[in-house]
Image (cartoon, rainbow, N blue to C red):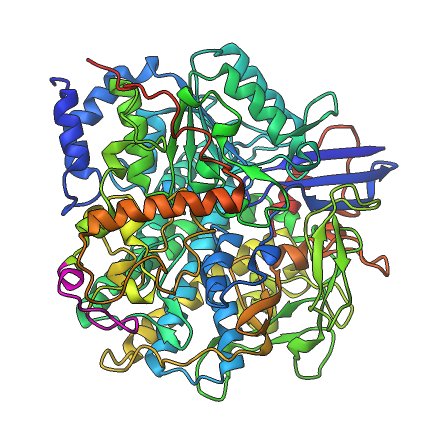
Amino acid sequence: MKKISRRHFLKLCTASAAAVGLSQMWIPAVGEAFRKAAGGNPPILWIQGSACNGCSTSLVNTVHPNMRELLTEIINMSFHPGFSSKAGSLLTDQLMETSRRNEGNFILVVEGAIPRAYQGMFNIVGEDSSGKKVTLISLLSDLCKRAKTVIAVGSCASFGGISAAEPNDAECVGLEKLADVNKVVNIPGCPPHPDWIVGTLAQLLLYGNPELDDYGRPKLFYEGLIHNNCPRRQYFDNSIFAEQPGEDGCLLQIGCKGPLTHGDCPTRLWNGASSWCVGANAPCIGCTDPSFPDLTMPFYKRMSEIEGPGITSTADAIGMGLGVATALGLAAHLTGNYLTGRIGRKKRDREGDI
Amino acid sequence: MAVVVHPLNRGIRPIRIELDTDGGKVVGAKAGTTYYWDFANTLKGKDPMDAIQLTQRTSGLDFVAHATAIVRALEEIAAVQLTGIAVLTRNVLLGLDIVYGHITHFYSNVLPDYIPFPEEGPFYNVAGDFRLPPGVRDSMIKNMWRAFEIRQLIHNIMAVLSGKAPHICSVIMGGVTRAVTGAEIVRINSVLKEVAGFVNNEYYNDLVQIEQVYGQYFLIGGGAGNLLTVGEFPRDKAGNCLFSAGVNFQAARFNKKLISMDFAGAWFEAEGTWEGPLAATLKPKPDKPGGYSWVKGALYRNKTCEVGPLARMALTGNAQITGLGKRAMSVLGRYRARLEECKVLLIQITGWLEQINPGEKPAEHTEMPEEGEAIGVAEASQGSVVHYVSIKKGKIDKYNVLDAYSWNLCPNTREGLKGPMEQALTGLVVTGPEVTADVLRVARSF
């Protein structure tokens, strides 16, 4: 079987998912490429921080490959708290040992935010065999240094997300505050689509680092604005707005955050291409955006920055305008919490080449 | 001597267990979570509707129950009467979420304590007490992989109704955002058959194998035996439910206003005055003396109570569970209750879908009143969920979420009461400093 080219891979990833998820690209070329690479794939250590476990639940919804294929043939998942039969200090010790043995080689995946208040006492992950309490922040400070690549899965790990929503008593932050920003790939979403997680790992293992946008998100999945690819876009252009869920029309008036949110939900669809939020007549809540949820609430009220019916500017301009408004609002709200991390820093082409 | 398990993993939140042992027996236990996970203070000042989305993030497993509990509270304040299709659609979603939770619990949380996995990959083994024959182990591992596919299929049909899963967007005040179509019902029914096939064959057989080889777990892990359910699956406008609300220690009609919060053993302190048993503003305090958990405790009539599938099946007289007699209050009784509930719910879900009239209006649009307060309750796979909300000038003033952790892992109360998991661990035999399989199996049975 010929290994598929990177170009072909990218094309398959971004293709509209009229079929299911990544399935179009999966059978059989990519599976074969993975099987060949298998033994040599770097180990993945998956850590759960302050989160609801929804990101791991979402990963289980991967269709092609399914979980068995993913875990036994494709990725080398060396550690995940949900799959470990060990408990207690055995688990903490195992984790540290694996990370030391694979220093500079493993991929660290983090689900959940990292609380900083009270020296990290808002999240104690366990005790090691010497009986010492290990805080999440101290564990991740070590692991981030040793990892080759750090992947933030979900909006909490990426930008703080719901964990960091005001007043943020635990002083939660995303991974970029802890790790070298050049090592971090963000896969936001609440939760992220399983294809975004699996697809990013696939890209990383087969072709090297994916190309990222200004917020560290793989362009492969996050480049498009929800609003631009929305099947209800025609309603917006014609100023037809729904006033209640269930009515025909653009959902802007009942709170849709599609004009500021990036992701391929409208074309990829969710859960085996069953539906997506707008498909269920519900507004997008902006869950992949760094401003989620502080500035995308109220979820069911119109974004105040947007003028009502009779809008003349294009949606792209609206998206950009909102981006700026969002940034300003955030600076005021969160004293520039996450924005200092990546925006305005050095930009580089992170895409590995083959 | 103290024995510590931290973390107890594989559940939705890691747990820390500390056991005091004396003469080879556990004489006291502390069980709690060690990370702060609470949205009460974030919700203060927010639009009440935002809580329907935000509080789902309490649990990546039982998110439908949280959306359901808060939306019921808001609907009580606004005095909205739901249409038939709204009630039935929500029942289907919550029923599927509970079945999903049980399959996840058995195959991801329970099973790895009974079968050794191959030592490669993400699987590590706890030493010893693997007694199932090799052929049985192999088929269980095969079924474990199949369980992942079944879970994915359940979320697929939930998404047909709700947009996506985890975390749904179709539940709104006054009903649901869309009416299911006839074609979708056909699709959902087809998947339901596949799920029922798995539950009645693979899941059932795997549980029976464990019951036969590990029969001693019908005798331990019971706890004190106070059971509670807040009731679930409304079946008529009078509010009668498939599973009626109730407790086993008092005959009087269940009254949700007798639920109270107790956080004596938790890392919280109250701010200002309480306006009711659930109407407190709590602030996190990780260095509070005597604190050992981030769980806000829940009491009914000042008693700690076990919630979850065993409570629901026992209190509503499920013949398979009541037939176990005293043995129902045990590790295996809890596993069995989850399976029996799956069987009941899968039949019910098909019935609810049949009753749906797709032509009905999915939501009654109602304005949210500017002032009000209510308690919303719902059942989740892990157990009863309680949301307290008060609204002032159109914004949330006070909010508290209690879930299965609040009941089953209720930390030490002001009166020195112990939570159900702590009681279930007390009395176990622990001879050395190492954690035994018994401890892990009892703790993971909740």
Residue B13, how many percent across, how many down? 58, 44
Q: Is the magenta stretch mostly helix, strand or loop?
A: loop
Residue A164: image quadrant is top right
Residue at 32% x, 27% y: name it: A201
In depth, the one of A173 and A36 nearer the eye is A173
Q: Can you see residue A302?
A: yes
In depth, the one of B155 and A222 nearer the eye is A222
Q: Quadrant of the N terminus of chain A?
A: top left
In depth, the one of B381 and A236 nearer the eye is A236
Q: Give the range drawn in magenta.
A: A234-248
Apparent side of residue A315 relative to residue A262 in the rendered image (left or right) = left
Residue A63, how many percent across, how many down? 27, 42
Residue at 52% x, 32% y: name it: A84
Residue A153: image quadrant is top left
Determine whether A345 is above or below A56 in the image: above
Apparent side of residue A74 relative to residue B308 in the rendered image (left or right) = left
